[in-house]
Image (cartoon, coloured by chain):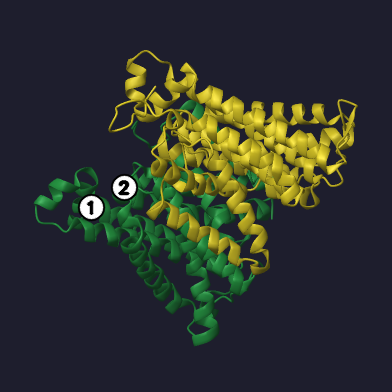
Chain colours: A green, B yellow
Amino acid sequence: MFTIFGIPSAALFGQLLIGLINGSFYALLSLGLAVIFGMLNIINFTHGAQYMLGALSAYLLLKYSGLGYWPALLIAPLLVGAIGVVIERLFLQWLYKLDHLYGLLLTFGLALIIEGIGRNYFGSAGLPYTLPDSLRGGQNLGFMFLPNYRVWVIVASLTVCLGTWFVIERTRIGAYLRAATENPTLVRAFGINVPRMITLTYGFGAALAAFAGVMAAPIYNVSPNMGSELIIVVFAVVVIGGMGSIMGAIVTGFGLGVVEGLTKVFFPEASNTVIFVIMAIVLLVRPAGLFGRRA
Amino acid sequence: MERVVDPVTKRPVLWRQHSEEIGFAVLVVALLAAPFLVYPLFVMQALCFALFACAFNLLIGYVGLLSFGHALYFGWASYLSAHAAKVWGVPPEAAILIGTATAAGLGLVAGSLAIRRQGIYFAMITLALAQMMYFVAVRAKFTGGEDGIQGVPRGMLFGLFDLRNDMTMYVLVLAIFLIGMAIIYRIIHSPFGEVLKAIRENETRAISLGYKTERYKLLAFVLSATLAGVAGSTKALLVQIASLTDVNWPMSGEVVLMSLVGGLGTLFGPVVGSFVILTMQYKLAFMGEWVLVIQGVIFVACVLLFRRGIVGELAKLLRVRGL
């Protein structure tokens, strides 16, 4: 045990770890937002609710069907992704020709519906979700205690983020996706089913959010409000990073999580607001965002 | 100015030409009668929200800017107004001015940041800045945290009129609301307002015509924040409480909903919308959290089926110039 700038190392590294955890969720969610925005030109306000649905499904799977963490990590994203496909077919597909603002308003309405139903049946208080046995415990590194589960969350989300980046930037399907973002009409002329691609993209984005939600369930309690609080911070992350680049979203997400964690150590009063302050500074210095291209 | 002509005689139809003035007259008569027909406290609250929604609508309807953080100006104005009236003991007119000035200052800062990005980013930035100031309100001592500022005295207006009397208060709220509406009417029909509409339709073109659109957008933003501040300050005195509810993001969403239901870009839409939404909240209060679900459903329905809103549809039905 030693101290850095008068702060015990355990506290400092502990907050750094929490920062990386939060950063994982920021990265996963802003990645999903960026992918959806690229294809649909819609800012998905429902993203927070979909993250919450992921956590809630994990809770319900455990409570009513006895399916634990690992199956939930697979089932919840599939479930929420399927709901996302239905949402896209039922509601979003009518909005593509309208002003972007209507997409925001509609997905905001959907978020209210999902959150309201959640609060009706589960209240506003948090529901505990127990960790799988295989991920309990941790390593004592001497300067800090490293819980296994938190390491798993960081590794898993980093893998998923980089995997998504790889698929979009380096594979054939990703090339179709990028082409359809640039010029959907031309891509359709080549015989590619762009509307189906759009639907699946939305489903995938929703599934990413749900995946983040399942991973968040054992760390934070499962509560119907957990998404709306997070999504506003993620919006700030997206403004800072700009939605033009997938890698940009990942780097910004993790980076801001760490900054927020460190703020908790040095200026605890500012930890809630630091990301918004950074957003304001970025807007002053680099209005297009760190990785953004001028529209 | 666009003229509404009779399709057969090709002559302007007078009442359709002056629909906004007629609308004003109907509104004034209705509001003068309202306190004798409906619970006055409800009407006063609805008027505060109506002015708030009109202020929001000034941005979305006439400049095309969606501010998703208007609770910031409404809520902070109500805090400062409540604090000034209760702790500093200033008369109500000064309390309202202090709250309004706070909102104007915040609008200037937030506006100059937000107008640096367009479209969807503008909405996210305003929402994020509002959330930041929400956290500041949670932390700040003077706001009283979860309890808010309670027991705010209404006081004596100009030292003459006792606002503890609900009817006196009603006259004040009605006057503030009508002056606010008159200001908005004046703004949107001024040359300045025409430039705002040009920016809404095609900003690049407005720039090429030599307008410094950023300045126009910023001024419109500050005006909107200021009027939202007037509404917030008045509401704090009216209900004698300033609380976190008024600065939190659901309030920002609610004002969007009110304007959307009434009709974005219409003069009276936000007024109708706020009365509709508030009535719904009162009548359905027994349903608890389901109200949130219903509001979500209204959002979805309005966006998909009903984008003109109530007043917008009415204006189309009557084929009038504006309402």
Find residue B54 and report its image quarter. top right
Q: Which mark is residue A38?
A: 2
Please state the horizontal and vertical placement of residue B262, each as a whole percent of the image.
Answer: 51, 46
Query: What chain is tagged by disc 2?
Result: A
First in sequence: mark 2 vs mark 1: 2
For the residue marked with disc 2, what is the amino acid?
A: Gly
Please state the horizontal and vertical placement of residue A53, each as a whole percent of the image.
Answer: 49, 68
Q: Is A65 situated left or right of B2 in this image?
A: right
Q: Is A281 situated left or right of B117 in this image?
A: right
Q: Is B238 situated left or right of B161 in this image?
A: left
Please state the horizontal and vertical placement of residue B11, each as a whole percent of the image.
Answer: 33, 25
Q: Which mark is residue A177?
A: 1
In the displayed orientation, state which residue is furthest to the top. Answer: B210
Look at the image and tell me in which quarter the N terminus of chain B lies: top left
Q: What is the CA distance from the residue labelled 2 to the residue labelled 1?
A: 9 Å
Q: Nearer the viewer, residue A59 or A250?
A: A59
Instruction: Examine the rendering and report whether any part of residue A96 can be seen.
Output: yes
Q: Nearer the viewer, residue A253 or B79?
A: B79
Q: Is residue B162 above or below residue A7?
A: above
Question: Mark 1 packing: few (<14 Cα in 10 Å), some, or many (20+)?
Answer: many
Q: Secondary structure at mark 2?
A: helix
Q: Residue at left 83%, top 31%?
A: B92
Q: Which mark is residue B305?
A: none
Please state the horizontal and vertical placement of residue A79, each as a whole percent of the image.
Answer: 39, 73
For the residue marked with disc 1, what is the amino acid?
A: Leu
Q: Are marks 2 and 1 in contact (CB under 8 Å)?
A: yes
Q: Is residue B283 above or below residue B148?
A: below
Q: Secondary structure at mark 1?
A: helix
